[in-house]
Image (cartoon, rainbow, N blue to C red):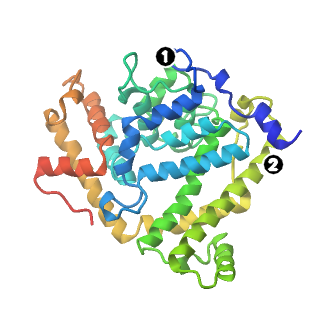
Amino acid sequence: MAVEAFARASLASDPERTRGRLHAEPPSATRSAFRRDCDRIIHATAFRRLAHKTQVFVFHEGDHFRTRLTHTLEVTQIARALARSLSLDEDLAEACALGHDLGHPPFGHAGERALDECLAASGGFDHNAQTLRVVTALERRYPDFDGLNLTWETLEGLVKHNGPLTDRAGKPVARYGERGIPRAIVEYSAAHDLGLWSHPSAEAQVGAIADDIAYDAHDIDDGLRAEILRIDDLAALPVICEILPEIARQHPAIEPSRRVHELVRRLITRMIEDVIVQTRSRLAALAPATPDVIRAAGAPVVTFSPVMAEADRAIKGFLYPRLYRHRRIVRIMDAAEAVVRSLFTHYVARPDDMPAEWLHGLDPTDAPGRARRIADFIAGMTDRYAMVEHARLFGSTPELR
């Protein structure tokens, strides 16, 4: 049997066999369960807010830099392309990609660092756990339940975006080994067991590796556009060192902007093609009879080849000091962290300065509960709204330039 047919028969998640939703609902007459998840995420308030949340550059630095929303859409496109080539369920891969960044606070990782520090005595802040809170509690659109009531498979993909959270005995692993599993994940999984010990579905793995591909290619694009990076600086990086001479041979008179776009396009294509070849090889060796075999495989099935994995590490290793830790970015993000910390400190002292709906049911004697409510409020802010709130409360606000 061809790999493609084999994958469709035994690997793809079947929306007709979903493990269901926490709150039972009648099926849609026109959409699969996973397509319905995609649509619910797209219509969510938190999804719209991604348009004004930082990816690398804050919102006012230029109209053409990526935001969390444009990044999410690019991840989704790559995830769909991979799922289609691997004969997976495209809707589930899309749902995992669409929702993967919903829990990010304003100012990207700077906002996350600030909230994590503010919540140090209350379990810290984790954007994956916050994503789960958004889609299971904080979105309030439906009369019968809080959250979006997504399928088990989509929630699994969002929570296990980076792989298992525990071993089979329930001991936290990887980045959760030291601090433990965030409370939001523990509590939800107790009611709707997400199998924290296993890898997620192949579709969720597709969403995760699509995120890596998008980060590599599009952060290079934004770094070049911002003139923080120079294209000649990239010439020694694996894969890129092959692409740039190809472009020069085939298009010797190409203008600089087109050269950048061609580099990004070819890099994405090569990474996608590499994942497809490597994943097909792994599937052929594993021969899964059901999607659950993928979950229990003990290692990701959707991966780069060893050569491309090394290229991915090299690109990320290049970008970290030269782009993410560039003095201009660090200066702006340090100021952004200060904005978030100031907002949190103020709301702890003056919770009445939050909108009335955020005060409903708040117990003034429950300090951890109050801290988490304040973090939920701040995490939902866009960059722009955080700056407006800071200016309203403090009178002066850094320009983040």
| Residue name at image x 44 percent, y 27 percent | 148
Q: Residues within 10 Å of mark 2 (few under 14, many from 20)?
A: some
Residue 155 makes an appearance in the image: no
Q: Is residue 5 above or below residue 396?
A: above
Q: Is residue 237 above or below residue 79?
A: below
Q: Residues within 10 Å of mark 1 (few under 14, many from 20)?
A: few
Q: Amino acid at mark 1?
A: His
Residue 395 locus on image (x, y percent)? 10, 53
Residue 260 locus on image (x, y percent)? 54, 72
Instruction: Please identify the quarter of the rendering in which residue 379 is found.
Output: top left
**98 and 161: which is toward the camera:** 98
Left or right of residue 8: residue 51: left
Contact between labelled residues 1 and 2, with CB atoms less than 8 Å apart: no
Name the residue beneath numbered marker 1. 23
Mark closest to the chain's N terminus, 2 or 1: 1
Checking the image for residue 271, the label placed there is none
**Dot 2 lies on which element?**
helix
| Residue name at image x 52 percent, y 30 percent | 37
Query: Which mark is nearer the camera, 2 or 1?
Result: 1
Residue 21 locus on image (x, y percent)? 53, 20
Residue 121 locus on image (x, y percent)? 31, 37
| Residue name at image x 36 percent, y 71 percent | 327
Q: Amino acid at mark 2?
A: Ser
Left or right of residue 122: residue 270: right
Name the residue beneath numbered marker 2. 281
Q: Residue furthest left?
A: 395
Residue 197 makes an appearance in the image: yes
Instruction: Please identify the quarter of the rendering in which residue 141 is found.
Output: top left
Q: Residue furthest bottom?
A: 253
